[in-house]
Amino acid sequence: MARETTYLELSQEDGAAHKFYEVTVDGATVSVRYGRIGAAGQLQSSSFPTAEKARAAAAKKIGEKVRKGYAPAVRGARAARSVTRRQVASAPSTARAVAPVLWRFRTGSSAFGIHVDEDRCWVGNQAGDVYTVSHGGEVLARYSLPDGVKCLVADEFWIYAGCDDGTVYDLSSKVPFGAYGIAADVDIYWLDIHEGVLNVSDAGGGLTVIDHEDEHQWSRKSSGTGAWMVRADERAVYHGHSAGVTAYAADGTGQLWHTATPGGVLFGWQEEHAVYAGTVRNTVQRLSKATGRVEASYPCDSAVYSCATSPDGRHVFAGDSSSSVYCFDADGRRLWKLGTGGGSALSMQYLDERLYLVTTDGSLVCVDASEAAIAAAQQGSVPTAVDVKSAAALPVFTPAASASAVATVSVAAVPAGGVVVECVQQGGRMRVQVVSGGFEPGWNVQFPRGIREVGARYVVDGLHAASGGFYRVRGEIRRLV
């Protein structure tokens, strides 16, 4: 029997979706390729007992996508989403001594994303790989996403990865899922999430705000371009670009302040009362969140690619384009400068006297930032860094392609503590509501877009109330049959 291929695309005028779905039937095998228009996408194949059953399964998959708005198309007719890979130079460090690196994990591709919490370290690279690593340097798990990871952000204990394909994936449960979709005409540079509200800064200097239901709220165009900084709290969104830092009211009602910086902003950090902007003109500036006033400056010797602070801003750290890392006191006095020993730090985070870096060579590096270790390093005494290896049997988690790819559970087998949710149509939008008792009926659930089907019911292992007035999934999702 001849090989049959059906190619579909969903490209909405408002830019909310820009993706393809291709189904190929070859005898008793069904192959599904899906992803961002213009990209190779991900491939999944399934075998069936007969060719007839394979064709029936393919027809079901195609029907599901058509009902969601996909339509037949010609591959290559639509342009791919604009994607900017950050082009950075990294020169050797001019520091006389090297930082006391405890361990180094090489991810295999240039990496920008980092998040460190009490339990583990997260690193994401431009190959679409996200790894979790223990504080002791053991690789725990790997997530394989469809496209390059721009950044990793946390919102309470939920972890999100923003990817080049315009999807923001929730990595908090066993199986990652797409929680937000970003307009196809937005060339993503950086992301932040606060109480379920996603803030997106882009190549054109724009800022886009999307709520937990994945619906556009408001947007602004700054006076600059290349917006590599966005940070948010309950009061405002702080947007850094080539012309400085601009603060907007969290509800989008207006601009609160604007502060010009010495050179374009390449990175941003925030504490409770201040934001920190690393600039191309070799400086980190601390700005008051209330007024935008420059409270302190931290001069480096090259362009600042990243910055971070210890709790309450007692110490300020910076990574420059010459593979050096710095530490300053709160007032701006330089305490030390050391070489990273392996590229420039593109992102960083401090926790419990350790400074974690992701560098231009794609490594996650753990530096002992204690006073004793730094003093020894300045005298030329550093530990032998452990070269962390990834185990061959490491579990790899990938997003579910469709509802049919999600594990199922029968009504009789719903686990104790399982919560049932249902997909419903409201005002032209797909919503997910809690069916089980004991939950606020007016709140919806932040739920994977790819597996929403009208009338479908799912069981989730954990459902938590978010401060923004909605529920988030924390645990496995299974379809109720």
Image (cartoon, rainbow, N blue to C red):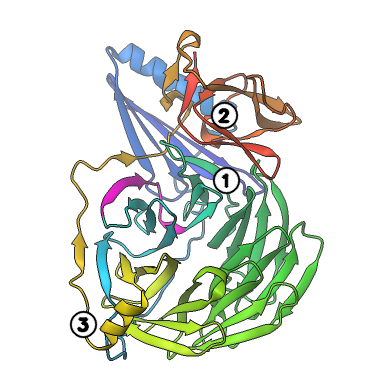
Q: Tell whether 315 sits left or right of 258.
A: left
Residue at x-position 64% and y-position 25%: 434
Residue at x-position 55% and y-position 42%: 179
Q: Could you say which disc has been placed on residue 452 in the image?
A: 2
Q: Main secondary structure of the magenta part?
A: strand
Q: Position of residue 359 (x, y in %)?
A: 34, 70
Cα–Cα span, label 2 and label 3: 57 Å
Which numbered disc, 2 or 1, marks the residue that appears first in the sequence? Answer: 1
Amino acid beneath label 2: Arg
Q: Quadrant of residue 243?
A: bottom right
- Does the residue at mark 2 contact the one at mark 1 (Cβ under 8 Å)? no
Q: Nearer the viewer, mark 3 or mark 1?
A: 3
Q: Which residues are magenta?
A: 138-151
Q: Position of residue 214 (x, y in %)?
A: 64, 44
- Does the residue at mark 2 contact the one at mark 3 (Cβ under 8 Å)? no
Q: Quadrant of residue 372?
A: bottom left
**Crowd tier of the residue under label 2, counting other residues whose Cα lies within 10 Å: few below 14, some 14–19, many 20 or above:** many
Amino acid beneath label 1: Tyr
Cα–Cα span, label 2 and label 1: 13 Å
* 127 is within the stretch colored magenta: no
Q: Tell whether 466 sits left or right of 108.
A: right
Q: Could you say which disc has been placed on residue 381 in the image?
A: 3
Q: Nearer the viewer, mark 2 or mark 3?
A: 3
Q: Position of residue 344 (x, y in %)?
A: 35, 77
Which numbered disc, 2 or 3, marks the residue that appears first in the sequence? Answer: 3
Amino acid beneath label 3: Ser
SS under mark 2: loop
Eyeballing the image, is 444 above or below 181? above
- Which of 106 and 398 lies nearest the eye of the viewer? 106
SS under mark 3: loop
Q: Residue under circle 1?
A: 180
Which numbered disc, 3 or 1, marks the residue that appears first in the sequence? Answer: 1
